[in-house]
Amino acid sequence: MKKELTLESTDKKLDIDDESYYKSEFQKLTSEYKTLKLNYIKLKSRSNKFKGSIVYPFYKITSSIGKTKFGKILQRLIK
């Protein structure tokens, strides 16, 4: 999702306070972006570890068996 940013040129000069405010906002947003990026990387690595483990193939097999008529009967017998 891309957002376009359009700026209009003005002859107004920024005050020193405005400049410091924008710098602090920029730093805050970049730090927030970095933390979100790190969280994304951590979640991605967790999902990849799960798919590489032995649990995932068994989950796929058992879930596909459970969708069949035989699997549903087997589930009822086991319960």
Image (cartoon, rainbow, N blue to C red):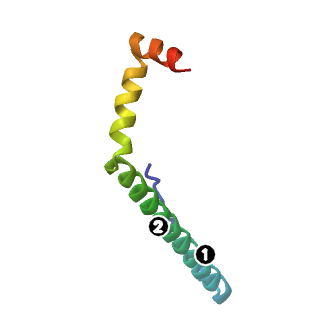
Image coordinates of residue 22 in percent, x first then y, are: 60, 78
| On screen, residue 24 above or below 77 | below
Image coordinates of residue 66 in percent, x first then y, are: 43, 21
Is residue 10 at least partly visible in the picture?
no
Q: Residue furthest bottom?
A: 16
| Residue at the (51%, 20%) spot, across then down | 78
Q: Which residue is mark 1?
A: 25
Q: Residues within 10 Å of mark 1 (few under 14, many from 20)?
A: few
Q: Which residue is mark 2?
A: 38
| On screen, residue 75 above or below 32 | above
Q: Nearer the viewer, mark 2 or mark 1?
A: 2
| On screen, residue 21 above or below 32 | below
Query: Mark 2 and mark 1: span between their CA atoms?
Result: 20 Å
Q: Residue furthest right?
A: 17
Q: Residues within 10 Å of mark 2 (few under 14, many from 20)?
A: few
Kind of residue at badge 1: Glu
**Which of the two residues, 17 or 58, is positioned nearer the viewer here?**
58
Helix, strand or loop at label 2? It is helix
Helix, strand or loop at label 1? It is helix
Quadrant in the picture for residue 42 = bottom left
| Residue at the (65%, 81%) spot, across then down | 21
